[in-house]
Amino acid sequence: MHARVALTLLAFITRVAEAPGAPGAIKRKGAVVATTVRLRRLAAELRQLRKIAELTREQVNEQTGINVATLYRIETARVRPQARTLTSLLDAYRVAEPKRSELRTLLKQAATRGWLHTIASDLPERYASYIEFESEAREVLNYECLFIPGLLQTERYARAAVTSTLPESSREDVESRVETRMRRQAALTKEQPLKLWAIVDEAAIRRVVGGREVMREQLDHLLEITELPNVHLQVIPFDAGGHPGMTGSFVVMHFGEAVGPDIVYIESHAGDIFLEEEADVARYNVASTHLRAGALSPKASASLVAAAAEAL
């Protein structure tokens, strides 16, 4: 990678990471706004139906009395519409059954958090939001500079990682997080599995988290799980030099047009950030492309992981 390109990408990511109030960050007063994936899907459906009906927001306002600004917030998943508002919109767009019932059901589901609430109601809202987005994503690119990605962690490694990074957490909180992390991994083996492209710095492979036995088990698990056709792992070796991921880890979640725009997630102790502005997401996609190009191939990465496990 050219040094100028790498420095430009590094500078951008640094600015974003240091600016939690930047445009596109789904965050307010330190707490992530819990925009559900189902609400994003409903918003995308309503946008599409209005376009099919060939109506502007102003024309919808004339027909239904729904404020233009309110309609904009509904179509961008800023607010959850009331049932009567949804009915008015479906009438204006001349939507028939069974589509009407599907959208009413989607509206009801937009107020829930799927499986998450059954075991992890005490998790931080920002983590709950991330898990919900991840559970609905079609593809996830996860770059990690210090840890094995959560979707690829063993239970013992996950417990050691959580305990190390959150030393003040209670045993109950640690176990809740570990259990939730293990539940998340079902996405990789479900009928229509999540496609995961994991890129990790060699430091994540070499750092012994939880002791030699735990780390060896983790590396062996990496070799096994990456045999799945939907899971790809690339390692950026130490001798690759500088790269766009040196400022920190990030996740890019791709949903498809039916749900809405892609989202970038950045985690930190100071507060997590969700980016959804097109320009921001595009820059992280560019960074991801450069990281993949600078990393070892999946086959060479597996060899590095195997060698690291053998050395323990």
Image (tube, grey):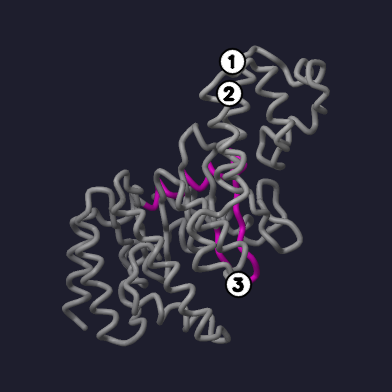
Quarter assignment of residue 268: bottom right
Identify the residue shown where x is 49% and y is 32%. 257
In this figure, which residue is indicated by the disc labeled 3?
269
* Percent x, y of residue 59: 77, 15
Where residue 210 sits in the image (x, y, percent)?
35, 85
**Amino acid under disc 3:** His
Position of 83 with respect to 173 (left or right) is right
- Residue that extends furthest to the top in the rendered view of this protein: 54
Residue type for callout 1: Ile
Determine which of the numbered discs, if any, sits on residue 134 in the image: none
Q: Are the residues at dot 3 and dot 1 in contact (C-beta closer than 8 Å)? A: no
- Which stretch did the figure color magenta? 266-291
Alpha carbon separation for disc pair 2 and 3: 38 Å
Q: Are marks 2 and 1 in contact (CB under 8 Å)?
A: yes
Would residue 258 be found to the left or right of residue 197 on screen? right
Q: Residues within 10 Å of mark 1 (few under 14, many from 20)?
A: few
Residue 286 in sight here: no
Q: Are marks 2 and 3 in contact (CB under 8 Å)?
A: no
Between residues 170 and 97, which one lies in front from this camera angle?
Answer: 97
Does 64 sit above or below residue 142?
above
**Residue at the spot 50% in from the left edge and 86% down from the top edge:** 171
Q: Which residue is mark 1?
A: 52
Disc 2 element:
helix
Q: Determine the image quadrant of residue 95.
A: top right
In terms of depth relative to the viewer, which is nearer, 237 or 267?
267
Q: Nearer the viewer, residue 143 or 149?
A: 149
The residue where tag 2 is placed is 48
Residue 302 is a magenta residue: no
Image coordinates of residue 162 in percent, x first then y, are: 47, 78
Q: Secondary structure at mark 3?
A: loop
